[in-house]
Structure formats: structure tokens, C-alpha cells
Image: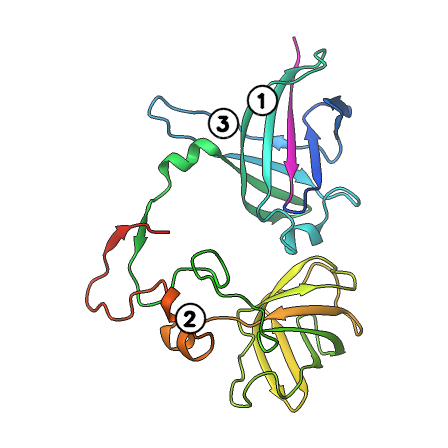
Amino acid sequence: MQVVILLKITDALGATLAFTTHTEDTERDSVTYLARPGMDITATSAAADMSVDNTRVRGFFKTGTVTMADVINGRFAGATYELFCTPIDETEVGEYDFGSIGEVVVVDDAFDIELRSELSKISRPVTRFVSETCDAILGDARCQYSHSSPNHLVTSTIATVTDAITFTATVSAGTHPDADDGWFNDGVLTWTGGSNDDYQSVVGNYTRSGDTGTFALILPPGQTIAVSDTFSVKSGCDKLISTCASKFSNTNNFRGFPHVMGRAYFFPADN
């Protein structure tokens, strides 16, 4: 009896990618699992102590299925997977494993994906590391800050392009104080038009002169940026309590320990 492995990935936008180790495309439960680009999957095992070896999958880039831009633009961030093992002649599948997508790396002309089983959460740390800086993500449930203010959420259009990561756009001089170069440093920039539409980038450095803001991204987007591409960008946070106070007035939700001195300690996680 010949057995094949089927992998279904659902990205954060709800789109589905499905691959099989079979030599031909395979349909199960109304989902078509593609043999090309196909995949090479490592063995996975669970021990009696409930420890799990995370599985790795390698596939090849193919236009219309998985592209280099998908990986660079973070398409797999927040994605989940379902892994099935089934005889070729069966019409239905039984779930073998499920979980979330971990590390995704590019190796030559292929992508390498880590599958993190739900069982692996058993060994996940449940304590917080006490440090001076905040360990919340700006705007999440623990931070609770909302980018509703117009000086913390800006929409604009690329005016000039310097290189793969640097461009200028109109940002009103009234948006933030003149002295605050770096206002959008570490901020999330969402592309709303152009070749990178619906993807996100992170701002590495930002300066403004008059009504012209200059943005330098940490990494180039998956597709080339161009004049007239549109985007929205949220102000960023350097995780310091001084920034939390002066920039966001949100110290009641600050999740760091700025007044603890000496050695660091672990405390039980809170909400």
C-alpha cells in the first residue's frame, strides 16, 4: 500500500496552499494538493515524555503558487497547517498533525518551512523575563494602544525612490514634532497599492524635512517599490518607558520593569 503525505497551509488572509509528496496532483475533501512544486518533508516523532521534534518542509518556488515575494513579505506569518498521511487509493483523509508555521527561510531556489505542532506548546515557556524595556507589542491586547490619532497613523504615496528600501513621501509637518526624527522607526508600514499591495514592511529609519518624509525599510519588500505606490504607516515604539509616556501617554499599560535594578529575574506570565 503506497502512502502519500498531504500538507495544507492556511495563511493569515485565509488563502490555502496545498502540497503533496505524490507524483501527481491529488484531490481530497475538495482540496487539490499540488505535486509541483511538491515538497520534501522530514520525519517527525513524539516521545513518551510528550516532547516533539518539529517538522521541516522544503518546496520549490513556482509562479502562482509560492514565490520569493511571499516569503519576504511575510505571507506565512500567522499561518497554520494541517498534515495528513493517507493511502493513495483513499478518497478521504484523517488528520495526522496540525499547528502553526514557524521559521521560513530561503535556500537557493527553494523555501524551507518549520511546522510547529500544537503539542510543542507544552514545552513553551510560561514566565516573563524581567527587563527594563516593555515586552508587549505596540497595539496588542497587553499594550492596548490604538493608532487612531492622525499623528500616529499616516497614509501617503511614494513621491521618489532612492533604492530598494528608501523612498520619500508627503507627510504633513503638523503630523509630529520637528525634533522627532525617528517617529516611525520600528513602525509597521502596510502597502495599500502597487506590486506589494496587502503586504507589510517594517520601518528602520525615518526623518522628515518640511512636508517630506524619508523612509528606509529594514528589508526590501518582495516586489520593487515604485513612485505612486500607496501605503499606511503606524508610528513605532522603542519599548522605553520614557517613550511610552511622552509619545503614547500609555504608561498604565507599560509591560516593562524600568525601576528594577541588579540581576534579572523570571516571573509568572500575566495577561
Crowd band around label 3 with a 10 angstrom C-alpha radius: few (<14), some (14–19), many (20+): few
SS at badge 1 = strand
Left or right: 161 as drawn, with respect to 176: right
The stretch of residues the image draws in magenta is 1-11
Task: Find residue 57 and report its horizontal and vertical position in percent.
Answer: 59, 35
Q: Is residue 174 above or below residue 118?
A: below
**Which residue is denoted by mark 3 in the rendering?**
44
Q: Residue at x 54, y 87 (%)?
A: 177
Residue at the far left in the pictured view: 262
Query: Is label 2 in a helix, a strand or a loop?
Result: loop
Q: Residues within 10 Å of mark 2 (few under 14, many from 20)?
A: some
Among the 4 quarters of the image, the one containing residue 169: bottom right
The answer to the question of whether label 2 and label 3 lie on touching residues, with beta carbons closer than 8 A, is no
Magenta region includes residue 132: no
Q: Residue at x 60, y 43 (%)?
A: 79
Q: Nearer the viewer, mark 1 or mark 3?
A: 1
Image depth: mark 2 or mark 3 in front: 2
Residue 78 drawn at (x, y percent): 57, 46
Tag 2: residue type?
A: Asn
Q: Position of residue 129 (x, y in %)?
A: 30, 56
Q: What kind of residue is marked 3?
A: Thr
Tell me: 245 left or right of 182: left
Q: Looking at the picture, tell me which residue is in the foreground, 8 or 69.
A: 8
Q: Which mark is residue 246?
A: none
**Eyeballing the image, is 98 above or below 160?**
above
Q: Is tag 2's residue or tag 3's residue first in the polypeptide sequence? A: 3
State which tag comes first along the sequence, 1 or 3: 3
Residue hosting label 1: 95
As measured in the structure, the alpha-carbon distance from the residue carrying label 1 to the one carrying label 2 is 44 Å
State the residue at coordinates (33%, 64%).
Answer: 256
Question: On the rendered image, what quadrant is the N terminus found in?
Answer: top right
